């Protein structure tokens, strides 16, 4: 039977061992192999193949320190304080898909044009001063009124109205379009309109002139009834002098029986509470 050393003798040997370590400059007990030399033994190392260049810059589990938790170790992270919601590139910086200077996690328009000439706002969207959907750089009409229908170049589209043969009454199909136009004018008090009336060539010159004037007046009356100040609207009749297309066919004549609109600067703004009220025509008269 092998005799076991006494407890006192064992304690003495351990003390001698610890003293020898201290004298040799060793600061910790040997706990097993450490393949990546990060100071965490392989038995406790969750990342046993960490780059040796880290020189101990690892956490208690032997994995590279990553202060912002973006998956890029601090030693390679050029943006070490990236917000948790941000997707990052290989350098640890927030991705900017469209290269507009606004990172994707803050970009409301992450696929805006990559043209560097197109300035963007703080939300990463192309600056569009009149909010018509066409960036200012490409907008040929940068002061389009709010809520106006525009074409691809950002210019206001006001569709023509059409009339029945020898009539100045508004067609029911046109009323909804005029309602939208009146709403737009009320929203944009600085905008006025010239209302142009036209006729086809089937009547006499004088009659067509009068008919075109009545058509323009009918449009103005509808808009003023909806609340637009009458001084913002100027009516002009052109008779048959400015056809939209040839009068040789019925289809062409139907297109020529029309009302058109030309935006203009409105006179001095009318107070909102007076929009649409009858004006005192006696002012300034004897």
Image (cartoon, grey):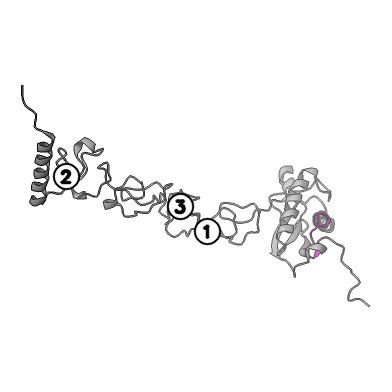
Residue 86 in percent (x, y) is at 41, 48
Q: Earlier in the sequence, mark 2 or mark 3?
A: 2
Residue 221 is one of the magenta-drawn residues: yes
Residue at the bottom extreme? Answer: 286
Residue 225 in percent (x, y) is at 84, 55
- Residue position marked by numbered label 3 in the rendering: 113
- Specify the label residue 127 is tagged with: 1
Residue 283 is one of the magenta-drawn residues: no
Residue found at x 42% / y 58% = 116
Q: CA distance from mark 2 to mark 1?
A: 54 Å
Residue 6 in percent (x, y) is at 10, 33
Q: CA distance from mark 2 to mark 3?
A: 49 Å
Q: Provide the residue span drawn in magenta.
A: 220-231
Helix, strand or loop under label 3: loop
Disc 2 + disc 3, Cβ < 8 Å: no
Judged by depth in the image, the label closer to the viewer, 2 or 3, is: 2
* Camera-side residue of 254 and 145: 145
- Residue position marked by numbered label 2 in the rendering: 37
Residue found at x 69% / y 49% = 246
Dominant secondary structure of the residues highlighted in magenta in the image: helix
Helix, strand or loop under label 1: loop
């Amino acid at each position: 039977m092998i005799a076991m050393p006494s407890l006192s003798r064992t304690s003495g040997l351990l003390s001698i061992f610890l003293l020898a370590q201290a004298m040799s400059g060793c600061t910790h007990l040997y706990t097993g192999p450490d393949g990546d030399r990060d100071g965490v033994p392989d038995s406790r190392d969750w990342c046993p193949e960490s780059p040796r260049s880290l020189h101990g810059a690892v956490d208690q589990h032997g994995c590279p320190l990553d202060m912002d938790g973006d998956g890029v170790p601090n030693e390679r992270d050029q943006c070490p304080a990236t917000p948790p919601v941000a997707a990052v590139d290989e350098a640890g910086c927030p991705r900017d898909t469209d290269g507009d200077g606004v990172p994707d996690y803050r970009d409301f328009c992450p696929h805006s044009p990559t043209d560097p000439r197109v300035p963007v706002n703080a939300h990463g969207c192309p600056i569009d001063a009149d909010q018509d959907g066409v960036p200012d750089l490409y907008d040929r009409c940068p002061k389009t009124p709010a809520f106006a229908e525009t074409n691809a170049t950002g210019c206001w589209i006001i569709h023509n109205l059409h009339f029945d043969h020898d009539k100045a009454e508004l067609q029911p199909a046109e009323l909804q379009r005029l309602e939208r136009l009146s709403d737009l004018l009320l929203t944009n008090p600085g905008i006025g309109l010239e209302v142009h009336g036209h006729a086809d060539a089937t009547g006499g010159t004088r009659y067509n002139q009068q008919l075109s004037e009545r058509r323009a007046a009918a449009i103005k009356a509808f808009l003023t009834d909806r609340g637009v100040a009458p001084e913002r609207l100027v009516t002009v009749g052109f008779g048959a002098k400015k056809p939209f297309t040839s009068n040789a066919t019925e289809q062409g004549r139907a297109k020529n029986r029309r009302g058109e609109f030309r935006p203009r600067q409105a006179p001095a703004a009318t107070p909102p509470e007076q929009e649409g009220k009858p004006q005192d025509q006696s002012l300034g008269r004897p």
